[in-house]
Amino acid sequence: MSTTFFNYFKYFCQASVCLAPTKEIVPLCTLVVNNFFDIILTML
């Protein structure tokens, strides 16, 4: 389940980068993806 969500979020970030190629959204997505599991554990 978490893997599916991770893939979905990854594709979402890629789409966001394509739709809005700014210098802010890329580091944001990278930060969230890199800390994905930490964020999930925090939510739990």
Image (cartoon, rainbow, N blue to C red):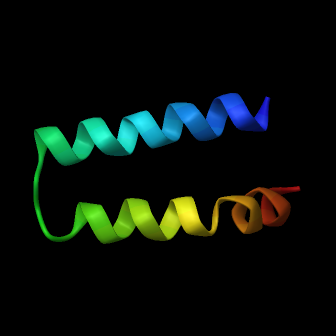
Q: 3 or 24: which is nearer to us?
A: 3
User: Is 3 left or right of 32, judged from the image as shown?
Assistant: right
Q: Where is residue 42 in the image (x, y as percent from the top left)?
A: 80, 66
* 37 lies above or below 27: above
Q: Position of residue 6 (x, y in %)?
A: 62, 41
Q: Where is residue 5 in the image (x, y as percent from the top left)?
A: 64, 34
Q: Write down the quadrant of residue 43 in the picture.
A: bottom right
User: Is 42 left or right of 3, judged from the image as shown?
Assistant: right
Q: Write down the quadrant of residue 25 in the picture.
A: bottom left
Q: 33 or 40: which is nearer to us?
A: 33
User: Is 6 left or right of 19, judged from the image as shown?
Assistant: right
Q: Could you tell me which quadrant the N terminus lies in?
A: top right
Residue at 63% of width from left, 69% of height from top? 35
Q: Could you tell me which quadrant the C terminus lies in?
A: bottom right
Q: 15 or 41: which is nearer to us?
A: 15
Residue at 39% of width from left, 36% of height from top? 12
Q: Where is residue 21 in the image (x, y as percent from the top left)?
A: 10, 53
Q: How many marks on residues?
A: 0
Residue at the right extreme of this rendering: 44
Residue at 31% of width from left, 42% of height from top? 14
Q: Write down the quadrant of residue 28 in the picture.
A: bottom left
